[in-house]
């Protein structure tokens, strides 16, 4: 092929419109498959709680809304950090706002909790297992999400990995809520957040190593 023909071909290709929402098209399927795998693991490993009882409980919806909100914040971060020259302001604001609101709910609940019930409100009966279970459920989705992010153009690999880790950590925590029967807002604010934070940290470390150009 002559040089002039090659240049003309490249110029014609450059005129084609870019695919809309390229990050969503990659992260969305990765998150969906990760959620399905996490659900299958949960059912085989820990089992489901009584869902009829769960959906009638405000605490279940509190946990679900909180973890999904963190997942959305993570998606906003990953979506921006997967592309060069973008700012992640919206994701950061969403993350801070969601955590602050949850801490406020927990503080109000603790204020009205009798002293003898304080330990149960803070630790429940699964505090030492909850964060690690969330991380375990998040790992498949994190692996898939990092592959998706790697196919884009992250110039801040650790931060992009952290955003992906937050995203899949929120999804994994939502799935874990289908098993967990803890009802305290303080438990959710501390131990669910700890599990999602561990997923975020794991994503940052993996991103630093795997997403560098």
Image: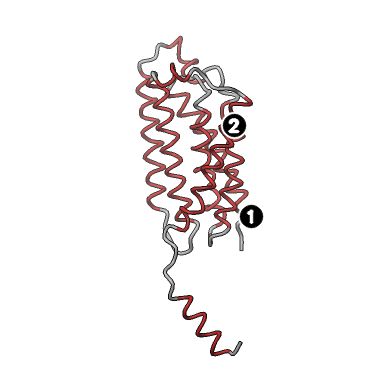
Residue, far top: 116
Find numbered disc 2 in the image and state the secondary structure of the residue it sits on: helix
Residue at image position (46%, 41%) is: 71
Q: Is residue 4 above or below residue 186?
A: below
Residue at image position (48%, 54%) is: 25
The C terminus - image quarter: bottom right
Observer-nearest residue: 10 or 118? Answer: 10
**Closer to the observer: label 2 or label 1?**
2
Which label number is shown at residue 210? 1
Q: Position of residue 177 (x, y in %)?
A: 49, 27
Residue at image position (42%, 58%) is: 87
Q: Position of residue 11 (x, y in %)?
A: 48, 81
Which label number is shown at residue 40? 2
Q: Is residue 177 above or below residue 166?
A: above
Along the horizontal axis of the image, is 56 left or right of 173? left
The answer to which of marks 2 and 1 sits earlier in the sequence is: 2
Q: Residues within 10 Å of mark 2 (few under 14, many from 20)?
A: some
Residue at image position (60%, 25%) is: 129
Observer-nearest residue: 76 or 3? Answer: 3
Q: Residues within 10 Å of mark 1 (few under 14, many from 20)?
A: some
Q: Is residue 68 above or below residue 26?
A: above
Find numbered disc 1 in the image and state the secondary structure of the residue it sits on: helix
Along the horizontal axis of the image, is 184 left or right of 7? left
Q: Position of residue 167 (x, y in %)?
A: 49, 43
Dividing the picture into quadrants, the one containing residue 198 is top right
């Amino acid at each position: 092929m002559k040089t002039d023909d090659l240049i003309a071909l490249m110029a014609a290709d450059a005129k084609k419109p870019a695919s809309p929402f390229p990050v969503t098209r990659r992260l969305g399927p990765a998150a969906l498959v990760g959620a399905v795998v996490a659900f299958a693991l949960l059912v085989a490993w820990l089992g489901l709680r009584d869902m009829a009882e769960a959906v009638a409980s405000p605490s279940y919806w509190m946990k679900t809304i909180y973890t999904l909100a963190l997942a959305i914040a993570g998606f906003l971060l990953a979506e921006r950090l997967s592309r060069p020259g973008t700012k992640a302001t919206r994701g950061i604001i969403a993350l801070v706002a969601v955590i602050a609101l949850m801490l406020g709910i927990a503080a109000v609940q603790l204020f009205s909790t009798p002293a003898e019930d304080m330990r149960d409100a803070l630790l429940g009966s699964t505090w030492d297992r909850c964060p690690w279970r969330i991380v375990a459920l998040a790992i498949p989705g994190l692996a898939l999400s990092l592959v998706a992010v790697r196919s884009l153009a992250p110039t801040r690999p650790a931060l992009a990995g952290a955003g992906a880790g937050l995203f899949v950590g929120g999804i994994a925590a939502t799935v874990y809520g289908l098993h967990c029967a803890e009802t305290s807002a303080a438990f959710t604010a501390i131990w669910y957040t700890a599990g999602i934070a561990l997923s975020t940290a794991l994503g940052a470390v993996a991103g630093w190593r795997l997403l560098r150009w």
